[in-house]
Amino acid sequence: MAFPDPTKPIASCAASTCVDCPVSKKIHCHFRPKELFHFLLISLPGFVIGGAVMLTVGIWPLALYIAIVIGFFGFLEIRVMCSHCPHYAEDGPTLSCWANHGSPKLWKYRPGPMSNAEKFWFFSGLVVVWGYPLPFFFHTDAWLLLVLYVMINAAFFTTLTSFLCSKCMNFACPLNTVDQVSRALFFQRNPSVACHWDTDKRFDL
Ligand code: SF4
Ligand code: SF4
């Protein structure tokens, strides 16, 4: 399982070394198995519960669920959101970050903000991926599992935005919660990214 070399600046970075870089404490320029494990630990339980309830109805609803999940995390999200991420500029045909690890990079790198259309498809995908299992809880009267599904996914999104999105280098993502000071530090070392943002107005460079 490949991860970026933590001793080397990423492709978009103009610095010559990562040693003592203040950005490294604020933003995950490099990913480690620890972050991937953290992401899988908080994201998978909701999918397992949703899939298990579908399986009580039949194999085809589950097969469609798996196709929707792969279609979103493997393709749609990569096109509309990840293609804006500085990590997308790294060498190699697939992503090696903490989420979407292994997803193919079929599209060109698009530094800078997401368009409104991209945001629409991103949020539509989120609604379909997490909303598709809901009718199956009602259909099978699995009320306790429904409560568990809602609580686990609420905990997932809270943990995601608090601990992972708060250090993610993709400022284009609508879920990104990196503070303005950290963004400015990142932009100072990554001018090839900063030039695609309205940095004079939004960030204190
Ligand atoms: S901003 Fe550049 S130098 Fe600093 S940690 Fe990230 S890749 Fe390394
Ligand atoms: S936006 Fe997140 S999931 Fe997508 S490439 Fe960047 S770090 Fe990976």
Image (spheres, grey):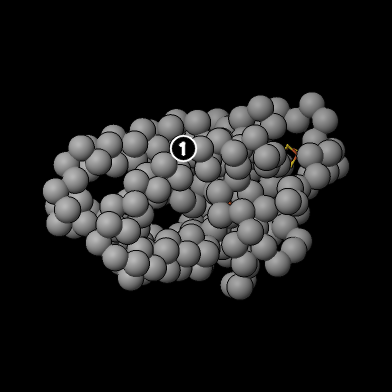
Image location (x, y in percent) of residue 177: 45, 37
Q: Secondary structure at mark 1?
A: helix
Note whether residue 124 is visible: no
- Left or right: residue 138 compared with residue 199: left
Amino acid type assigned to the residue bearing label 1 in the image: Ile
Image location (x, y in percent) of residue 141: 14, 48
Image location (x, y in percent) of residue 119: 37, 60
The residue lying at 43 percent from left, 32 percent from top is 159
Please tell me which residue lies in front, 109 or 121. Answer: 121
Please tell me which residue lies in front, 21 or 44. Answer: 44
User: Which residue corresponds to mark 1?
Assistant: 42
The residue lying at 67 percent from left, 63 percent from top is 94
Quadrant in the rendering for residue 112: bottom right
Rendered position, 132 above or below 156: below
Quadrant in the rendering for residue 142: top left
Tell me how many marks there are: 1
Note whether residue 11 is visible: yes
- The quadrant of the image that shows the C terminus is top right
Quadrant in the rendering for residue 117: bottom left
Rendered position, 165 above or below 83: above
Please tell me which residue lies in front, 2 or 116. Answer: 2
The residue lying at 55 percent from left, 30 percent from top is 181
- Left or right: residue 136 compared with residue 197: left
- Left or right: residue 192 compared with residue 63: right
Please tell me which residue lies in front, 125 or 7. Answer: 125
The residue lying at 68 percent from left, 40 percent from top is 33
Estimate how packed mark 1 is, as few (under 14), some (14 to 19) or many (20 or more) residues with alpha carbons within 10 Å.
Answer: some
